[in-house]
Structures are given as structure tokens and as C-alpha cells.
């Protein structure tokens, strides 16, 4: 259980108790237990502001029991953990399928009906699994590992339920982490090494100044307090609106969280009966591409193939060519989900031909843009969205969100303004009692996180050129003995790792493993 009054001195303090923290600690304890001869006990503090440790919002109670992995188990689960995880799924199958049947409703029933035949054939690789299963697996493995390490006096792990709001450098390269609990009480701890594992930056708010208590409902973070709580809140609001044409939801953004919301509400008949329309506005006007078998194995990206024959080209030329070939593919009815691996392999080949400075420029200037172009999602998620589109319950709007103003004639509704593809400001004809922000995370130079701002201000951490992560050494150090792991490594570019985002479990696992090796070798 978390403690209220942390002791002062630790060898390592991990700030954040979500999936980045748990996967790193899992590797660290495994390494310690496998090389424990002559090792003194390592005192480790783990600080987490939520009451649930080890899972974070994607794999814990803030998500739905029906929330699925965005890619197949084969792509999602780290390769080194895959066999262990599948063994765990088999051994606990009766328990978690029973849990789904009892608590998952229509979505769970459909998922079980669709996937049980593959489970019985032991064909796990192509299944989009309920995400909570990976969270439960990591939690079970880590709790057992902690207990074993403590019994052997290898490590002593203390859990502290609080939010880390600042880090101060002390004499001798140790650090003081300042903490604030849920009641606002302050405390601090001292650690020789700090691991910053706080996950992604806060969501980028689109809350307009005109939104008041008497206005429409604004949900800034779909996962706070939880996605199912917010769906029930929207359904309750709809239940109080007599005019069916006014039961609308505006979603700002068309990313994975938007898709998850659509999947979950599609499987709630009472919600759909009340719903008039969901409008999802984004720059692309597109949802992530459906992951499909390679339907066009012989498709040729002609301009990229032509570029590969050249000896010299710039990173900007490469990005322009990628976008040109994607537009051509769409005009021929070929979606990126159908040709993902051909495109990815070709882009990697072309990137590797650039000199290091141009590779870094592509990485910094175009990496995230490229990622948005090739976003993918599983069949179950995309098929649910497609059904909502066919039922006229969903509309994807290409444009720039501007604002939502209060509707002056009737409290409780907003009027949505956006900039269309002709760069004209437009007022949407529908009224919206609910606005949901799914626009993504803040950039670090304009971040509302207290600890991130304090780290930048004190120059303990420097924002990298992508503005989505911190600069680190090959040892993941932002400063001496201050390590970064998880999404705040977004934009990392060195001889060991080159990622423009570090948000999926496989990449977090990889960097956590590498950091654990570094820490154990230093001990």
C-alpha cells in the first residue's frame, strides 16, 4: 500500500507509476535478481498521483473493460514478453472471459464471439485483445517480482501516492523531489537517481473562454475520471433533451481516443437510440486507417521508387514525395492500411540513404507528420466507426477547429465554428450539448504540467527539436543521474534509438529494458 509520509533517502526515485514505470521496474528487478551476489539492498521509491499503480490510463480502470489494443497482439506485445504473456492468457482464460461476459455487455459478447474461435486454435497473434489484460499481466508479474526482491533483500520498494511537482538538484549530484498529495499536503524525498516516468504531457485543451457552468458540457480528457464515466455522463445529458435533433456530440480530433469512444458507444444501444449525430472535426478529416491483410501486395509507390534511384535528395523532398504518393494511392482507391508495410519499408530505405544531418531534420521536422499519415487501427474499431457513418450517426469533418460559443437562445448548448478547406470561417448548423476534446497532447514549450515547466526553467531538462520530448544522452540522461523514460522520450535521436514517438507498449518496453541495463551496470 502507498505510504502517506515517505522516508527521505532513496537510491532511485521513479516519478510516475504507470506503464512506463512498471515496465522499467520489471526489467530492473529482473536484472537485480539475476545478478544479486554481493549486491546491497537498493532503496526505490515510486511516486504516482493516481491510486492505481503500474497500469496508467490505457491499461487500467480509467479505460473501459472493452477497450482494445490498437494493433494486433503480435504487433503490440514486446517480442521478449510475448510467449510469457500468451501463457498467462491461456492459464487465466476462464477468469478473464468470465469477467468480460459479466461486465462487458454487447461489445464483450461480440468480441468473444468473433475471437473465441481463434483463441481455441491458439491463434493469438492476430487478435486485438482487451487492453486491461496487459495491465493485469504486468501488475501481477511486477507485484510478484517486488515481493521476491524484498524477501531476498535485493530491493526495498516504497509506493507513494502523490504528484511530483518539482525536482531540485542537491549537493553531490543527488536530487530532492517535491511532492503534493491529493489533499494538497507537501512532502519531499531525496534520491541519488531520478527516473522521470510521468507518461505523456497533459492533453491540449480546446476549452473556449465562453464556456460557463450554464453552458454545454465540456470534457477535456475523455479518460478522466474514466471513459465509461464520460459516456454515461453524455447519455444522461441526452436523456434530458426532448428535441432529438439537439442530441449531438462534437469531438475535436480524429485520433485513437476518438476511435475508441466511437467503438464503445456503437455497442451501447440505449446511447445510439438517443444520439442524433457525432461530428468529429480534424485537419485531415480522417480516422486511423483500418489494418487489413496486404490487399495490394504489388502496389508501387512510383515517385518514392524513382527517388530511391537518386544519389542526392533532401529530407523535405522525401516528405513531399511521400505525401504525393499517398495522394496518388488514395485516388486509385488504395488506402495506407492496405500497403502499410511496402510504404514503411520504402521510407526506411530512403531515410537510411540520407546523411545524418538530413535524417535528423526529417526526424525533427516531419516525423510526427509522417506518423499521422500512416496511423492504423484494428478492424473492430474501424468497422464500428464505419457502421456509425453508414447509419448517419457519425460525420467526419475536415477543417480547423476555432471555437464553440454559447447558444444565446437556450442554455446548455454550444454553436461550433470552424475553418473549412477553403479557409473560410463556417458555423455548423447543429447545436451541441457536449464537446469532447480528443486533440492530443500539449507541446512542451507551452505545457501546463508543473513538473515539466519546473524542469525546463531550472535547465535540468531541455526540450528537443520536436517539442514533444526532452533531449537525452545515449544513457537516457537529461542531466547527470536524471533519466527520462516513456513518452517524454518522443523525438529521441542518437546512435542507439531514433523514435519520433514513444507511446506504445513495445517501445516503452524497449527503452525501459535499456535503461534498466544501464542502471544495474552502474551499481
Image (cartoon, rainbow, N blue to C red):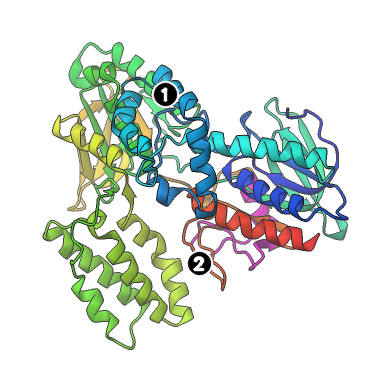
Secondary structure type for disc 1: helix
Q: Position of residue 246 (x, y in %)?
A: 22, 21
In the rendered image, which quarter is residue 517 located in? Answer: bottom right
Residue that numbered label 1 is attached to = 100
Residue marked by disc 2: 498
- In the orientation shown, which residue stands out farthest toward the front? 121
Picture layout, residue 378 above or below residue 266: below
Of residues 18 and 131, the one drawn nearer to the viewer in this rendering: 131
Q: Is residue 462 magenta?
A: yes
Say whether residue 479 is magenta: no
Find the residue positioned furthest to the bottom.
Answer: 311
Q: Nearer the viewer, residue 249 or 507?
A: 507
Q: Say which residue appears at 34% left-offset and 30% top-offset.
A: 435
Q: Tell me the element at label 2.
A: loop
- Percent across and percent down for residue 173 are 82, 59
Check residue 481 in the rendering and tell me which mark sits there, or answer none.
none
- In this view, the residue farthest toward the left is 332
Residue 334's x, y, as percent?
16, 58
Q: Position of residue 3 (x, y in %)?
A: 77, 29
Q: Nearer the viewer, mark 2 or mark 1?
A: 1
Query: How many angstroms separate mark 2 from mark 1 (CA)?
Result: 38 Å
Q: Which residues are magenta?
A: 451-478
Q: Could you tell me which residue is drawn at 56 percent across and 71 percent down?
A: 494
Is residue 228 visible in the rendered structure shown here?
Answer: yes
Q: Quadrant of the C terminus?
A: bottom right
Quadrant in the picture for the N terminus? top right
- Total tally of numbered discs in the picture: 2
Query: Which callout, 2 or 1, points at the residue further toward the start of the chain?
Result: 1
Q: Is residue 40 above or below residue 363?
A: above
Q: Residues within 10 Å of mark 2 (few under 14, many from 20)?
A: some
Q: Residue at x 49, y 38 (%)?
A: 58
Q: Residue at x 24, y 52 (%)?
A: 293
Amino acid at each position: 500500500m502507498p505510504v502517506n509520509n515517505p522516508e527521505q533517502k532513496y537510491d532511485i526515485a521513479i516519478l510516475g507509476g504507470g506503464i512506463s514505470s512498471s515496465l522499467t521496474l520489471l526489467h530492473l528487478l529482473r536484472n537485480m535478481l539475476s545478478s544479486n551476489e554481493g549486491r546491497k539492498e537498493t532503496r526505490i521509491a515510486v511516486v504516482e498521483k493516481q491510486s492505481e499503480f503500474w497500469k496508467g490510463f490505457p491499461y487500467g480502470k480509467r479505460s473501459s473493460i472493452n477497450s482494445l489494443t490498437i494493433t494486433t497482439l503480435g504487433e503490440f506485445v514486446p517480442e521478449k514478453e510475448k510467449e510469457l504473456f500468451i501463457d498467462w492468457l491461456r492459464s487465466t482464460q476462464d477468469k478473464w472471459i468470465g469477467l468480460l461476459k459479466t461486465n462487458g455487455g454487447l461489445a464483450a459478447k461480440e468480441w468473444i464471439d468473433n475471437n473465441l474461435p481463434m483463441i481455441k486454435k491458439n491463434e493469438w497473434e492476430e487478435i486485438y485483445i482487451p487492453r486491461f489484460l496487459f495491465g493485469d499481466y504486468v501488475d501481477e508479474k511486477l507485484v510478484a517480482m517486488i515481493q521476491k526482491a524484498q524477501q531476498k533483500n535485493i530491493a526495498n520498494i516504497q509506493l507513494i501516492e502523490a504528484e511530483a511537482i518539482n525536482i531540485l538538484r542537491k549537493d553531490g549530484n543527488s536530487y530532492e523531489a517535491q511532492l503534493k498529495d491529493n489533499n494538497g499536503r507537501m512532502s519531499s524525498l531525496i534520491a541519488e537517481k531520478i527516473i522521470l516516468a510521468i507518461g505523456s504531457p497533459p492533453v491540449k485543451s480546446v476549452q473556449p473562454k465562453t464556456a460557463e457552468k450554464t453552458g454545454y458540457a465540456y470534457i477535456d480528457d475523455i479518460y478522466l475520471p474514466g471513459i465509461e464515466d464520460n459516456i454515461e455522463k453524455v447519455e444522461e445529458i441526452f436523456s434530458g433533451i426532448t428535441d432529438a435533433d439537439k442530441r449531438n456530440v462534437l469531438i475535436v480530433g480524429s485520433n485513437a481516443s476518438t476511435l475508441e469512444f466511437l467503438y464503445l458507444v456503437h455497442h451501447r444501444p440505449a446511447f445510439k437510440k438517443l444520439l442524433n449525430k457525432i461530428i468529429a472535426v480534424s485537419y485531415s478529416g480522417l480516422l486511423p486507417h483500418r489494418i487489413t491483410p496486404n490487399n495490394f501486395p504489388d502496389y508501387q509507390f512510383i515517385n518514392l521508387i524513382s527517388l530511391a534511384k537518386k544519389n542526392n535528395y533532401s529530407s523535405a523532398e522525401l516528405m513531399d514525395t511521400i505525401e504525393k504518393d499517398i495522394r496518388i494511392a488514395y485516388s486509385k482507391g488504395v488506402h495506407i492500411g492496405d500497403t502499410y508495410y511496402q510504404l514503411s519499408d520504402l521510407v526506411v530505405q530512403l531515410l537510411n540513404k540520407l546523411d545524418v544531418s538530413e535524417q535528423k531534420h526529417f526526424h525533427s521536422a516531419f516525423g510526427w507528420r509522417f506518423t499521422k499519415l500512416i496511423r492504423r487501427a484494428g478492424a473492430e474499431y474501424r468497422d464500428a466507426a464505419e457502421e456509425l457513418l453508414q447509419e448517419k450517426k457519425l460525420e467526419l469533418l475536415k477543417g480547423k477547429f476555432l471555437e464553440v460559443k454559447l447558444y444565446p437562445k437556450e442554455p446548455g448548448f454550444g454553436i461550433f465554428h470552424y475553418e473549412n478547406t477553403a479557409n473560410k470561417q463556417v458555423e455548423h448548423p447543429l447545436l451541441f450539448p457536449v464537446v469532447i476534446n480528443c486533440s492530443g497532447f500539449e507541446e512542451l514549450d507551452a505545457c501546463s504540467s508543473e513538473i515539466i515547466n519546473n524542469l525546463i526553467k531550472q535547465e535540468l531538462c531541455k526540450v528537443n527539436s520536436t517539442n514533444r520530448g526532452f533531449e537525452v544522452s545515449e544513457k537516457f540522461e537529461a542531466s547527470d543521474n536524471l533519466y527520462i523514460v516513456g513518452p517524454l522520450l518522443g523525438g529521441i535521436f542518437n546512435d542507439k534509438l531514433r523514435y519520433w514517438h514513444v507511446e506504445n507498449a513495445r517501445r516503452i518496453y524497449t527503452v525501459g529494458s535499456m535503461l534498466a541495463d544501464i542502471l544495474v551496470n552502474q551499481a
